[in-house]
Amino acid sequence: EEKREKRNEEKRENKKEKRREKSKEFYRENMRKEKSREIEMIKKKRSDKRKEKKSEERKEEKREKREEEKIENGKEKRREKRKDETGEKKRKEKGEKKRKEKRREKRKKRKAISEKRREQRKEEKKEMKRKERRKKRKEE
């Protein structure tokens, strides 16, 4: 009887010990997981900071580029004004007007030629009809 009780007691102790070991192991595992999560969070924060920094740099570069373009555009406008003052633009416009005028003249000439040809064809048709009528009259 005592032996059985002793064995049972030992079994209970063993079970308790196993439970304690399991809970310790579980606790350790949880701590490990928690630490790894924290490490991941730290890494993520760092990478986010880096990304944020890069995006800020890109934004700054774009801003600078826009400002440079504005300055360049201003210079370009000033150049255009100077060109106007020298009359370069006016000379170009004159040349353009002359070219347009020449084109207009050529078009007029072509139209006149085609009109003449049309008139000639009409006259030729009339002449042919007259000749046909004369032939018919002679035959009759």
Image (cartoon, grey):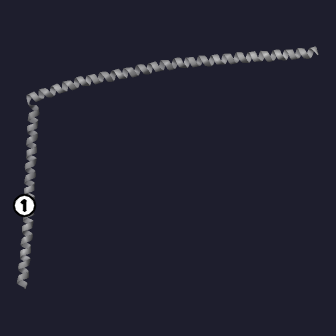
Q: Which residue is drawn at 5% across and 83% down?
A: 138
Which amino acid is tagged 1? Lys
Q: Name the residue under label 1.
A: 116
Locate residue 125 relative to residue 52 in the image: left or right.
left
Indicate the quadrant where residue 89 lies.
Answer: top left
Q: Where is residue 56 in the image (x, y as percent from the top left)?
A: 38, 20
Relative to 113, residue 45 above or below: above
Q: How many marks?
A: 1
Locate residue 21 relative to residue 42 in the image: left or right.
right
Is disc 1 surrounded by few (<14), some (14 to 19) or many (20+) residues within 10 Å? few
Q: Residue at x 7, y 69 (%)?
A: 124
Q: Residue at x 80, y 18 (%)?
A: 15
Residue placed farthest to the bottom in the image?
Answer: 140
Relative to 13, residue 89 above or below: below
Locate residue 100 relative to residue 66 in the image: left or right.
left
Quadrant into which the N terminus falls: top right
